[in-house]
Image (spheres, rainbow, N blue to C red):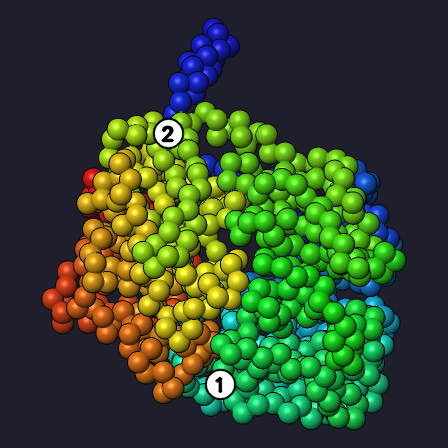
């Protein structure tokens, strides 16, 4: 009887699914509609195999590039001797791959930094031992000969010698919280230069070079923490526990940076003679293949001039080998993407108006451009020495789509991927094979193995089950569109319409955007919008909204003329283009132009406010999450890259200030912020609400205790936040 009842219930459920279920917010956020992919893929030295973590993070598996078949288990948490953790968070091979450094018990610090307990795992003995018994570590790294591991703890560098029973020694001793940091960057250098490590080994493993950050004169920022964790001093529990860190705002004092070398055998530390510009930065140091040459990259404070110095780590003598300049600013790819080959290096440069690859000798002599054309190179994958071919990712053909290419020394270029959408690759160490991950706006990730001619060998993941799960819902339609503004600028966007869309009706609109410099939200990828494949937008479409996103001027993928036109004038063109979008949408017969809303997060929150503070009042409602409201409150590196200092550009800061323009606000506004936002501080919201109050402007606000910039703290916080956003638009636009 129970079995029969189960069959009847199952049949009714199947019928209901076929009829089409309405997509709910719980489905968007808790439905688990994320595509399956491979985690932490690393190519192995033989050129034929790759390693990856199992989905449950309990194993490291070895697969074949030829067919994707798993041929071995390199590590298993359940059977490894001396390992008492249930899973790992990451891993790193020694150069000869006989050992694996296992990352466990990870605790985040800021966006890119974390501490973790690491274990050294011997594949031969199937045994794991702690890297250190003296506390968690940061950014561990094997020496090139595999006999040592360096790491940072409590702002100091340490060295573990594997051939001497893992003996641990301390390299620096002056590290101190809020004063001196060795080998890892301070907050602003980490956040804005996209790195969490500032040291490197020489190619012969005899020297370790590192950057020292003296943040003694940087102003402290204090945040009260409201939710007891049990870790703070018991005497403080009736009060807010303070959290303090160094944060330089635009125009303020930065950390002073110097470069040092440590001779491992003699244990002699030297200060290297690097001609740093006044108040300049060192975004990267990197040893070349020559152990006598450390490449030190420097930037002036305006970030418009980058010098590359070849520095001898023992004598300390430096020689400038290249200078890259811009009349505005240099983008992060220039220093983050530099790659040293045997006798050459690859430089990213926008000197032609688009980001391309250029070949130089290690002595700084220009050889030739590797890529050319009116498109952007997104990533350099590697060089095949035998075939003299260079592999890279670019958006040639469309700024909305990325494909993988190779080009040889004669300029012959071959497109290796053909799907209309977004691609990314992990190449084998010999560049003979690559694992490709493809998706587009309607297709979840397809993972394949391919040879270096582009031929698909095997499909590893097709996410067919995800498509089947989503098929039970009445999902909305997704499409791209293009329009031209009254300034004659062509803008790209995507639009999501309700599943039961009727062109004879008029629909309210919610526009989502980010709009920050060189960002890109409009691309032909499964990961558009919020929560994967626009899952939040799909929910809103099920509630009767048309959802829209447009990349305005200042965003990426379209060259420097489009991307850098906002220089010194953040807040001028970005909101204007969102207003233009709303006006264009209002001309469409199925759009209710009286009910258009806008929202965004971080820069998108800022641009929401600015878009609602224009002369033309086109937005009825808006939501600004974690929004900077005056660039004087934001950090030096990011803000000055685009605006210079407040002293140099007072007019630009005033015109681009939401606070200064508070009296111009039109429409209903919801402001959202996390009280522990270390990135965009809460005072942005508080100062703006004060200005709105004095201007007699109504607004709503929501604070999330102890949440940082991502607003995740607490198991229900994100759901509460998106429920609030959805409800705000439903109440004000319908």
- Residue under the point 83% across and 78% down: 290
Q: Give the mark nearest the N terminus, 1 or 2.
A: 1
- Residue under the point 80% across and 61% down: 409
Q: Is residue 328 visible?
A: yes
| Residue 226 percent coordinates (x, y) | 34, 66
* Gap in angstroms between the C-alphas marked 1 and 2: 52 Å
Asked if the residues shown at circle 1 and circle 2 are in contact, with their CB atoms under 8 angstroms apart, the answer is no
Q: Mark 2: give few (<14), some (14-19) or many (20+) Cα within 10 Å.
A: some
* Disc number placed over residue 122 in the picture, else none: none
Classify mark 1: helix, strand or loop: loop
- Residue under the point 75% across and 80% down: 364
* Residue on which the image places disc 1: 254
Q: Quadrant of residue 45?
A: bottom right
Q: Is residue 644 depicted above or below 496 in this figure?
A: below
Q: Is residue 26 depicted above or below 703 in this figure?
A: above
| Residue 439 percent coordinates (x, y) | 58, 41
| Residue 592 percent coordinates (x, y) | 23, 40
| Residue 648 percent coordinates (x, y) | 38, 86
* Residue on which the image places disc 2: 499
For the C terminus, give its image quadrant: top left
Q: Mark 1: give few (<14), some (14-19) or many (20+) Cα within 10 Å.
A: many
Q: Is residue 6 depicted above or below 412 in this figure?
A: above
Indicate left or right for 206 with 501 as reference: right
Indicate left or right for 411 with 181 as reference: right
Classify mark 2: helix, strand or loop: loop
Q: Quadrant of residue 588?
A: top left
């Amino acid at each position: 009887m129970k079995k029969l009842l189960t069959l009847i219930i199952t049949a009714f459920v199947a019928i209901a699914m076929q009829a089409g279920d309405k997509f709910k917010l719980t489905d968007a956020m808790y439905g688990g509609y994320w595509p399956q992919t491979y985690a932490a893929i690393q190519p192995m030295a033989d050129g034929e195999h790759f390693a990856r973590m199992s989905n449950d993070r309990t194993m490291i598996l070895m697969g074949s590039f030829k067919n994707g078949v798993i041929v071995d288990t390199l590590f298993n948490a359940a059977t490894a001797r001396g390992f008492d953790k249930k899973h790992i968070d990451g891993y790193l091979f020694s150069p000869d791959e006989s050992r694996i450094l296992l990352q466990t018990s990870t605790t985040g610090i800021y966006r890119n930094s974390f501490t973790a307990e690491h274990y050294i795992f011997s594949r031969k003995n199937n045994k794991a031992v702690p890297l250190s018994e003296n506390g968690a570590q940061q950014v561990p790294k094997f020496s090139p000969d595999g006999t040592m591991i360096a790491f940072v703890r409590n702002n100091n560098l340490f060295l573990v010698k594997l051939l001497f029973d893992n003996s641990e020694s301390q390299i620096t001793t002056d590290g101190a919280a809020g004063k001196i940091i060795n080998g890892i960057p301070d907050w602003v250098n980490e956040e804005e230069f996209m790195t969490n490590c500032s040291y490197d080994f020489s190619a012969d493993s005899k020297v370790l070079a590192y950057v020292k950050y003296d943040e003694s004169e940087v102003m402290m920022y204090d945040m009260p923490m409201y939710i007891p964790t049990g870790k703070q001093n018991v005497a403080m529990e009736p009060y807010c526990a303070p959290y303090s860190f160094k944060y330089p705002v635009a125009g303020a004092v930065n950390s002073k940076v110097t470069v040092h070398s440590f001779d491992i055998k003699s244990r002699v530390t030297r200060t290297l003679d690097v001609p740093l510009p006044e108040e300049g930065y060192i975004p990267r140091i990197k040893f070349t293949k020559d152990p006598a040459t450390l490449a030190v990259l420097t930037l002036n404070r305006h970030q418009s001039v980058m010098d590359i110095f070849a520095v001898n780590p023992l004598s300390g003598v430096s020689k400038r080998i290249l200078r890259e300049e811009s009349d505005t600013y240099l983008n992060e790819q220039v220093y983050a993407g530099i790659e040293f080959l045997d006798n050459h290096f690859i430089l990213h440069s926008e000197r032609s108006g688009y980001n391309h690859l250029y070949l130089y000798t290690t002595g700084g002599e220009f050889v030739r451009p590797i890529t050319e054309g009116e498109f952007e190179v997104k990533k350099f994958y590697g060089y095949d020495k035998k075939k003299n071919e260079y592999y890279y990712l670019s958006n040639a053909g469309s700024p909305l789509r990325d494909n993988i290419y190779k080009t040889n020394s004669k300029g012959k270029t071959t497109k290796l991927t053909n799907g209309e959408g977004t691609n990314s690759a992990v190449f084998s160490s010999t560049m003979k094979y690559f694992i490709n991950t493809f998706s587009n706006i309607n297709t979840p990730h397809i993972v394949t193995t391919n040879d270096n001619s582009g031929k698909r060998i095997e499909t590893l993941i097709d996410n067919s089950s995800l498509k089947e799960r989503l098929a039970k819902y009445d999902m909305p339609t997704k499409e791209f569109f293009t329009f031209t503004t009254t300034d004659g600028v062509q803008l790209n966007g995507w639009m999501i319409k309700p599943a039961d869309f009727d062109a004879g009706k008029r629909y309210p609109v919610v526009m989502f955007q980010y709009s920050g410099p060189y960002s890109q939200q409009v691309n032909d990828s499964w990961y558009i919008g919020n929560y994967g494949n626009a899952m939040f937008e799909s929910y809103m479409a099920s509630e009767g909204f048309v959802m829209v996103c447009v990349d305005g001027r200042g965003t990426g993928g379209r060259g420097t003329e489009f991307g850098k036109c906002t220089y010194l004038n953040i807040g001028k063109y970005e909101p204007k283009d969102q207003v233009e979008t709303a006006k264009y949408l209002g001309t469409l017969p199925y759009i209710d132009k009286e009910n258009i809303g806008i929202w965004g997060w971080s820069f998108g929150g800022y641009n929401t406010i600015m878009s609602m503070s224009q002369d033309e009042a086109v937005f009825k409602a808006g939501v600004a999450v974690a929004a900077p409201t005056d660039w004087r409150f934001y950090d030096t590196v990011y803000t000055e890259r685009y605006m210079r200092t407040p002293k140099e550009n007072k007019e630009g800061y005033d015109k681009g200030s939401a606070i200064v323009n508070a009296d111009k606000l039109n429409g209903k506004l919801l402001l959202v912020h996390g009280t522990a936002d270390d990135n965009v501080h809460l005072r942005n919201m508080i100062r703006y609400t004060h200005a709105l109050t004095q201007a007699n402007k109504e607004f709503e606000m929501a604070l999330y205790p102890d949440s940082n910039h991502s607003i995740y703290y607490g198991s229900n916080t994100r759901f509460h936040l998106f429920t609030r956003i959805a409800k705000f638009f439903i109440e004000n636009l319908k």
